[in-house]
Amino acid sequence: MILVFDLDGTIVDSIGIILKNFQLSFQYAQEKYPGDDKIRPEIGRGVKEIFSKFFPPEKITLAEKFFIENGNKIYLNSVQIFPEVFQILSNLKNKNYKLAIATSKLRKLAMPILEKFNIDHFFEIIIGSEDVKNCKPSPEPLEKIANFFNAKKSEIIFIGDSKIDGMSAKNAGITFFGVATGAEKFSELEKYGETFPSLKTLVQAKF
């Protein structure tokens, strides 16, 4: 069995940092910030796609560049791993589950986070936004992981914290489990698959 994890809001506690970075990016591009309630449901998509919903075309690249560069400065120092994630991943590996990550973050930004918490070695493949033409909710990241393992979709489970994750799993024809520790409300995640209060409670119930 292959378990694919989202990163932000699923493995690391970072949604507050991401929202702050969006706020600063809007300020930098001299656009009115629409509020966390408008940005939060979009987390999980590619950054460029999110900005394209709110910015005029001529400002998208400017905002995206600032978001990435500023994120590099604040993200790694501030982000925290959710409790017991290291032990959870270690136990899953010991039970012979194959582990992967599908994130809309650039892989080159995701790797230092995984290395910071010494969990990078648990994952056989990490798919970031630069590895696909279309980020989540496209099925492409999950399909790429399926191809890497030469696995049937029935052999894969995707675990995430946002409706974007749920939509990606649905579009790929893959089972989705939600964890209500990040971008989305419990009730919204339940529309896409069985949902749990945390990664710990999910693993205890299912694996």
Image: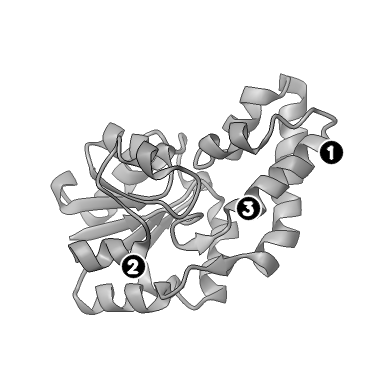
**Helix, strand or loop at mark 3:** helix
Residue type, numbered disc 3:
Gly
**97 over 22 or under it: above or below:** below
**Dot placed on the residue nearer the N-terminal end, 3 or 1:** 3
Res 200 label: 2
Q: Quadrant of the N terminus?
A: bottom left
Question: Is 58 left, or right, of 156 in this rendering?
Answer: right
What secondary structure is marked by label 2?
A: helix
Residue nearer the viewer, 201 or 91: 201
Q: Is residue 154 above or below residue 80?
A: above
Q: Amino acid at mark 2?
A: Lys
State the image coordinates of residue 31 (x, y, percent, origin top left). Answer: 80, 28
The answer to whether residue 113 is left or right of residue 66 is: left
Q: CA distance from mark 1 to mark 2?
A: 38 Å
Residue found at x 54% / y 64%: 111
| Distance between mark 3 and mark 1 Cα atoms | 18 Å
Q: Which residue is mark 3?
A: 16
Tell me if 18 is positioned left or right of 181 in this view. Answer: right
Check the image and report above or below for 61 versus 74. above
Q: Which residue is mark 1?
A: 28
Q: Which mark is residue 132?
A: none
